[in-house]
Amino acid sequence: MVNTKVKLCGIELDNPIIPASGTFGFGYEFAELYDINILGSLSFKGTTLEPRFGNPCPRIAECDSGMLNAVGLQNPGVDKVIAEELPKLRQVFKKPSMANVSGFSLEEYVETVRKLDTVGDIGWFEVNISCPNVHGGGMSFGTSPEMAETVTRAVREVTKKPIIIKLSPNVTDIVSIAKACEAGGADGVSLINTLMGMRINLKTRKPIIANKTGGFSGPAIKPVAVRMIYQVYDAVKIPIVGMGGVSTAEDVIELMLAGATAVEVGAANLVNPYASRDIILDLPRAMEKYGIKSLEEIIGGAH
Amino acid sequence: MKDTYFTLIKNEKIASNTYLSVLEGDTSDITASGQFVNIKLDGLYLRRPISVCDVEGDRLTIIYKAVGVGTEKMAATSVGEKWLTLTGLGNGYDLAKSGHAPLLIGGGAGVPPMYYLAKKLVAEGKTPTVILGFGKADEVFFKEEFEALSLKVLVTTVDGSEGIKGFVTDAMDGLDYTYFYTCGPEPMLKAVYNKTTTSGQFSFEERMGCGFGACMGCTCKTKYGYKRICRDGPVLEKEEIIW
């Protein structure tokens, strides 16, 4: 009997698997397919203070072993998320969820967190300072250590819940940004968000995606994720939520060995709607294969 | 929505660059015409959304044009191979509003969903008129299949090599209809929107990520709010469309 339980910022998870924000909506589409209470938790659709349509279509382009997306944080805004989406999520998911928030100014981050802080069944905040698909916000907060620390301090003021800062890989030194978040009072960091990429349609000779650039995700980016998690683990004491191309139980083990306490599954959910569930069901087999009795014991084991 | 393996039992070219596949598997989640399936192909990351052309028992018929790496791979697949297929996707056409004599307008790769729709309407005792639009004669398909349903079928080709010369809208003059349903390339849909005199339903196409509403990769703006083409569509009503 293997033990898949992990503790993330003081909250115990039955297993480390968390569907990544933007690939799982507010959970209820997937609840039609399987009981999503099998999940460790879920990070719901990135929420902003105001409603957002996002970017024009096409928003998606396929790549070898992955995809580009430039959705642009489409969401109904925090008030509607609280009034309409979270009650629907609550009906199908009984565990603490992760609230993924984004903003275009410091005030927006703060106001969005302040409003969501009143919702009882939110376990953690995942503060996205790394969206590559919006202009004048998102990633611009995540590309300098000073800005990252400022955002962290600001949201720290308005919630006692654990704050996990979601980091961009589109930086020269992700370690310095992770350290700045830790210094600002973050309880954890999650990485990596998508890598900025582009594809061009040979027939039209123009970028496929209307936004021109999109965030690259899928199995192709896993080595980048493993490397960055490994580097950040060496530099900070706070837990890491790892993500990037995870589609198998073996991938989960690899990211945990690099230093992840929990693991988010993103693009895989879009290709196989059962991906997160399948990975969880397959974890005991993979753990036995590699002689792992408890997942908690292997966190950072590659160091 | 259901994700199951379908076995390819027929895969043949029926017109220029156009292929018909018959798949055997669990079709129970396909509840309406105008829905689509999303097919996983080996070596390609995202699935391929393809509209449902017909369902009979456990047999699903799809028709697609081999225009990219995915559909070319599909065309080259041998009978007996299996495709992991998500079924029951999209809202589909609402038959309740059709009236007794609706007009069905399909253009190119938009023709296939019109066939399943026509069969459903005929089964309800309605007598639809069908307009099928193509580029030229060697692209024409399914004219006989529609005629076998004892329906009036008008074919148009842009170069006039078969049927009426011109676009689907050139076949609409003088036709009486109670409602309309259409699927085809967006310029055609817009022309149909401008020419039709009744209410109707349009099926749209967009590049998709997941095909079941999770990724927000195919959202469009409508008068009734933001809609995901894959989940809230692909069928939209005339009254809600913003061009």
Image (cartoon, grey):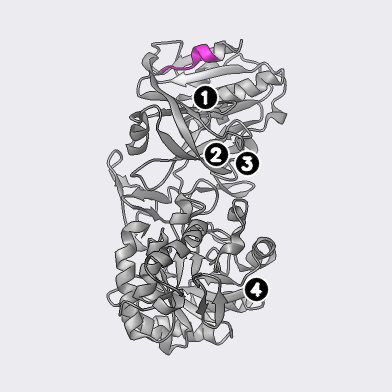
Note whether residue A233 is visible: yes
Q: Residue at x 41, y 89 (%)?
A: A183
The quarter in which the N terminus of chain B is drawn is: top right
Q: Amino acid at mark 1?
A: Gly
What whole-number distance in Å separates the C-alpha atoms at marks 2 and 1?
22 Å
The answer to whether residue A268 is above or below residue B18 is: below
Q: Residue at x 37, y 77 (%)?
A: A259
The residue that disc 4 covers is A121
Q: Please say if the residues under marks 2 and 1 sit with CB atoms less than 8 Å apart.
A: no
Q: Chain of mark 4?
A: A
Q: Amino acid at mark 3?
A: Glu
The answer to whether residue B114 is above or below residue A295 is: above
What whole-number distance in Å separates the C-alpha atoms at marks 3 and 4?
36 Å
Labels 1, 4: front one: 4
The residue that disc 2 covers is B87
Circles 2 and 3 on the same subunit: yes
Viewer-closest of B220 and A149: A149
Labels 3, 4: front one: 4
Q: Amino acid at mark 4?
A: Asp
How dense is the environment of label 1, judged by Cα within 10 Å: few (below 14), some, or many (20 and up)?
many
Query: What range of the chain is rendered magenta?
Result: B140-145
Q: Chain of mark 3?
A: B
Q: Position of residue B98 (x, y in %)?
A: 69, 26
> Which secondary structure lies at badge 1?
strand
Q: Chain of mark 1?
A: B
The residue that disc 3 covers is B240
Query: Which disc number belongs to residue B106?
Result: 1
What whole-number distance in Å separates the C-alpha atoms at marks 3 and 1?
20 Å
- A164 left or right of A143 in image: right
